[in-house]
Image (cartoon, rainbow, N blue to C red):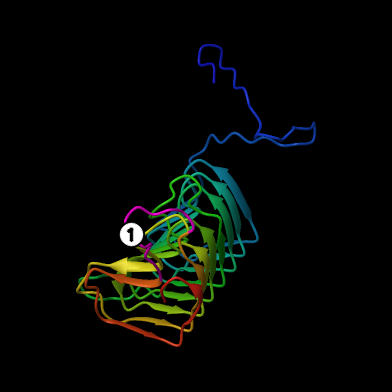
């Protein structure tokens, strides 16, 4: 960028020759869609792309449905949802600089659940720029159902967060944690008050470090309850080609 003349020069990726039909995108907006305090709104069958920060932000409100969205090439986190009775289903998320999807809601003080549903989504090739602690699915609060999602191909964790009364069921986590040590594809910890969380019927595959480590033998888990975390119920999960289950 020549800031005096305003001229932007693109140097293609090594070995790539641009043709007259190739498209080059320069992002100028931070967020494509923002819904603040809204109720009963549906976004369906849309493609959202090329934002500098987030693709879709739902802040507060209730009853928002994000259905079959394709969200890709986002500088930050693709979809960020807080509030209650929200549903994100059938969405495809790929190529984000940070996380893929973040969900929060409910009241930790009263343990009032959010009734948020995250189901049937695909999240892949996230954490492209900030490569640690940017999960496919970040979660906080009380009472989300996280069901039948596919989370794959990222250097650190696939699911990361903390809270109470969550259900994680039927999710597939594949090819994660390959650039880190002391971590997990499903990663949570350090909270004695976390109770009522259930992890069942999930599949963990190809979870292992693939880079040198300098802290002894690499420690990458499929499911990692770190630093005295207590109160989880975990059963009927499958671990395949995982360094430590």
In which quadrant of the rendered image does the C terminus lie?
bottom left
Q: Is residue 85 magenta?
A: no
Q: Is residue 228 visible?
A: yes
Q: Which residue is mark 1?
A: 216
67 relative to 73, above or below:
below
In which quadrant of the rendered image does the N terminus lie?
top right
Magenta stretch, main secondary structure, is loop
- Indicate the quadrant where residue 217 lies: bottom left
- Taking the view exactly as shown, the residue that stands out farthest to the top is 4
- Indicate the quadrant where residue 18 lies: top right
74 relative to 125, above or below:
above
Q: Residue 127, position in %: x, y?
A: 48, 51
Seen at 48% across and 72% down, the residue is 242
Seen at 50% across and 16% down, the residue is 3
Seen at 46% across and 83% down, the residue is 237
**Near-viewer residue (239 or 161):** 239
Horizontally, is 205 left or right of 70 in the view? left
- Indicate the quadrant where residue 113 lies: bottom left
Q: Residue 17, position in %: x, y?
A: 75, 32
Range of the magenta residues? 210-221
**Near-viewer residue (240 or 109):** 240
- Taking the view exactly as shown, the residue that stands out farthest to the right is 20
Element type at mark 1: loop
- Taking the view exactly as shown, the residue that stands out farthest to the bottom is 236
Q: Is residue 220 magenta?
A: yes
**Near-viewer residue (108 or 201):** 201
206 relative to 22, above or below:
below
Q: Residue 134, position in %: x, y?
A: 42, 54
């Amino acid at each position: 960028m020549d800031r005096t003349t305003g001229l932007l020069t693109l140097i293609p990726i090594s070995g790539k020759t641009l043709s007259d039909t190739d498209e080059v995108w320069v992002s100028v907006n931070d967020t494509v869609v923002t819904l603040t305090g809204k109720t009963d709104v549906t976004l369906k069958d849309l493609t959202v792309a090329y934002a500098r920060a987030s693709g879709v932000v739902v802040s507060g409100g209730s009853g928002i449905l994000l259905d079959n969205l394709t969200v890709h090439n986002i500088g930050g986190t693709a979809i960020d949802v807080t509030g209650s009775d929200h549903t994100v289903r059938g969405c495809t998320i790929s190529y984000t600089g940070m996380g893929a999807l973040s969900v929060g809601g409910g009241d930790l003080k009263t343990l009032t659940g959010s009734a948020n549903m995250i189901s049937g989504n695909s999240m892949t090739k996230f954490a492209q720029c900030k490569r640690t602690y940017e999960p496919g699915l970040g979660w906080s609060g009380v009472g989300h159902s996280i069901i039948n999602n596919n989370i794959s191909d990222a250097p650190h964790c696939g699911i990361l967060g903390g809270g109470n009364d969550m259900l994680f069921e039927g999710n597939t986590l594949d090819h994660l944690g390959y650039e880190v040590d002391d971590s997990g594809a499903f990663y949570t910890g350090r909270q004695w008050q976390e109770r009522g969380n259930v992890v069942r019927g999930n599949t963990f595959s190809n979870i292992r470090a693939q880079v040198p480590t300098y802290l002894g033998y690499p420690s990458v888990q499929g499911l990692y309850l770190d630093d005295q975390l207590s109160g989880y119920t975990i059963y009927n999960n499958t671990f395949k080609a995982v360094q430590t289950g």
